[in-house]
Amino acid sequence: MHFYTHSYPTTGYWTGEIPFFSQTFINVQQPQAVSATVPNMNVMGQVVNKTKRSVVMQTITNEKPPQPILPVRILELEATIENRPTTIDEKSPAVLKYRTPHFRASATLKFPPLEDGEHWKVGWIQSCTRMDFFNSYGDSGYSSWEFPQLMSGQNPMISDSDGRNYPFYGSKSEVIELEGPFSDYRTIKVLMNDNFYPHITWDIPTSNERLSRLTNVKRHQKFYTWLVAMNAKNGSILVLKTLTWQMDLEINVDPTQPQGSRAVLISNPIPIQPEILKQNIRIPTCVLYPPNANSAQILVWHPGSRPGEISQRPEIVVPPRCEYVLHQNLYYDHYIRHKTHTSVQNKLNGGSSSSSSSSSSSSSSENKTSIIQSSTSDSYCRLIYPQASMHKPTPIPGNRCYNGVKHILEDHARLAQGVIVR
């Protein structure tokens, strides 16, 4: 199966749901019987009509005719965010918790027949394009969860994969595998959901006390979500549909009030609904490979500064899980680095989510930290392939993430010419 160079999506889509199906065409290897005789050809096989020479020669040499173009049909596509406000939980003496409404996306498709040996994956890919995540502590300063790749401008976005099934968002209902042979269209359905459930310390992240100094929480995050079909044999990806969504919230906290009545949601309680784009956005290479949001995020403390300002002595209090992220990024060279504060680890209870360090699930990707970045439309569509280099960076001893990323990028550099994103 190969990609056809044009797609014909149905026009007139609106935010949230597609009532009628759209089609994206791909070339499918479907062998056709070749006739033993051809009209206007004599018994010696000589062409009588020269205008039909190509047809005759194809028949004589048993060459395969052009492959038929069969569509991937999107029967139904829906994307919504629960119409409810963010909920706040003040039960813990160490952290403030909040849970946002879920973003949910579902698609029902008909996939064309496959030959023996063909292998395709259909599912969701998601990236974070921006996030401002500021936790203010009055005059003491603020903490910020950040993605180094976005903050430095190294990449326009970062993968939001679960880290186990690149480049897909998840490994369960988020992706379906199709292996040939089968001769009829197959109806499949892929689902995904996402929300935030972070833990934010009441006290500043470098403190070993449990004081109440948190005064404000502000978060603004944006995503692209793609419905794609990927050829598992060569890695080629066909973008079927592109969605965009965001989550905005702000919580004011009065540290002088007793626990249980400190925090109030002051942002709009009604979430902005997702948008299904009329024109697809190409997926940059940086979204298809590690590191993902969970392994790249860092927590930075800016003492004596206001949100958005860079302090004179910023401290990385929670480093990325993947040390490769900072190893290749000079933006943070002047930041103070040290082992994660014991106070932060204790207060966040050793959680695994991003800005939350809370318990994570397939439906809650709290691993999206973010960035204020300036990007042009070109940067979103540009495809940059890693190039094999003779220069070997200094290895990071014992860092499996670094070694894994290095191995994947080297493999991709060798196969880059065969990777197509349409």
Image: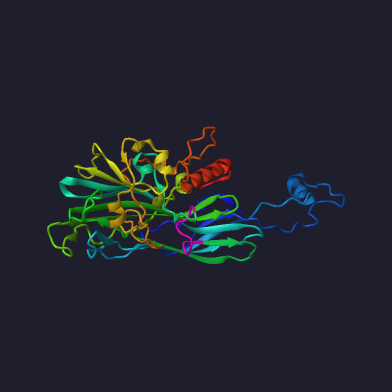
Q: Nearer the viewer, residue 12 or 345?
A: 345
Q: Quadrant of residue 311?
A: top left
Q: Is residue 251 above or below residue 289?
A: below
Q: Residue at x 53, y 67 (%)?
A: 187
- Majority secondary structure in the magenta region: loop
Residue at the extreme right of the image, as rendered: 44
Instruction: Identify the colour scheme used.
Output: rainbow
Q: In which quadrant of the rendered image does the N terminus lie? A: bottom right
Picture coordinates of residue 216 (x, y %)? Answer: 20, 53
Q: Is residue 370 magenta?
A: no
Q: Is residue 362 above or below residue 390?
A: below
Can residue 345 be seen by looking at this rendering?
yes
Is residue 289 something that shows in the picture?
no
Is 248 left or right of 50, judged from the image as shown?
Answer: left
**In-front residue for pair 202/119:** 202
Residue 15 x/y as whole percent = 36, 59
Q: Residue at x 80, y 57 (%)?
A: 36
Task: Out of 337 and 184, give the one closest to the viewer.
Answer: 337
Say whether residue 6 is left or right of residue 136.
Answer: right
Q: Would you say residue 172 sits in the magenta stretch?
A: yes
Outermost residue toward the left in this view: 256
Q: Which residue is at 65% across, 63% downward?
A: 181
Q: Position of residue 251 (x, y in %)?
A: 21, 57
- Relative side of 167 to 415, left or right: left
Of 32 and 169, the residue lying toward us: 169
State which region is magenta.
166-175
Q: Position of residue 143 (x, y in %)?
A: 25, 48
